Image: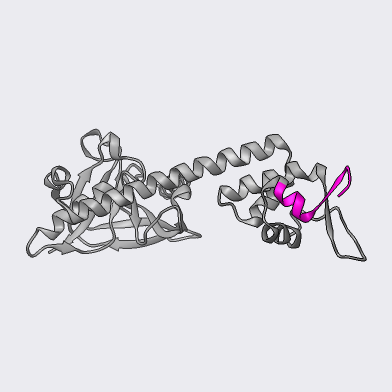
Amino acid sequence: MTDTHLLAGRFGALTQLSPKALRLYADQGLLVPDRIDPATGYRYYAISQAATARLIARLRRLGLPVARIARLLALDEMTRAAELRAWLAAQADRLAEQNELVDAIVRQSADGDAGLAGAVRVRDVPAAKLAYLQTHVDIDGLEPFAQHADSALRDALARAGLAADGPLMLHFHEAVGHDGAGRIEAAIAYAGHLEPSGELSLRLRPAGREAYLPAPAALQTYPQVLRLYDAIERWLEGQAGSCCAGSPYEIHPGTGGARFDVAYPIAP
């Protein structure tokens, strides 16, 4: 030990880092000893490295992986603070999603949202030609894709001289969440002749029926909107002879002034 350097053991005691942690951070390049005695192999850390060591320890207590800590250490203080605030906001969003998913499991195990399930209605859906775009998105990419698809589909219909004022339908063929991307389709019904081109595809929707719920204001954002899907699925479980006939979808705008409806195609 000198006035400016400490042996690894003393440095670890000063910074509350174990010998194992110091070795790991040295191997990863996060906190490399300032010098190593060539004769003894003793590792010496500069006292000035203590602040970095304490920062690393606190970042690890947040559960951040070593690779991300390395990126944070390379940033200036203001940028690092902004990155950490953004990470914390994402963690809060994730916790809110987990809370809602736990609530959904509890509702599924108990009586569920009886009020919402009782509000489910059924309506006929006419056969129609659909112009659509498909992609894979996570929950953060959902709204940007919906906005892009709405504009692109209406522009394509307008260029073909067709009416472009129908509702936008978002078909969820796979689960979409924070943890991973799912396949989603944005579609608008049209009448007339249209050729597929580029990312624009066409398909025929057969006539059928749908069970639907207009989205109340309090349930229009993720993950709260999952309650509407759960309610329709619960309603379907109580309908003898009826079952889900395809992927669920949202219809923008919805009925009765709602921002959107959640709907399931049903058979028969």
Position of residue 221 in the picture relative to residue 40 (left or right)? left
The quadrant the C terminus occupies is bottom left
Is 194 colored magenta in this rendering?
Answer: no
Q: Position of residue 122 (x, y in %)?
A: 13, 50
Relative to 75, does residue 203 appear above or below in the rendering? Answer: below
Q: Residue 184 versus residue 217: which sits nearer the camera?
A: 217
Q: Residue 37 versus residue 24: which sits nearer the camera?
A: 37
Q: Residue furthest right?
A: 39
Residue 69 seen in render: yes
Position of residue 7 in the picture relative to residue 57 (left or right)? right
Residue 72 seen in render: no
Residue range in magenta is 1-13
Position of residue 123 in the picture relative to residue 215 (left or right)? left
Relative to 10, does residue 268 appear above or below in the rendering? Answer: below
Counting the numbered discs, the total is: 0
Q: Residue 84 versus residue 59: which sits nearer the camera?
A: 59
Q: Residue at x 40, y 49 (%)?
A: 157
Q: Position of residue 259 (x, y in %)?
A: 30, 37
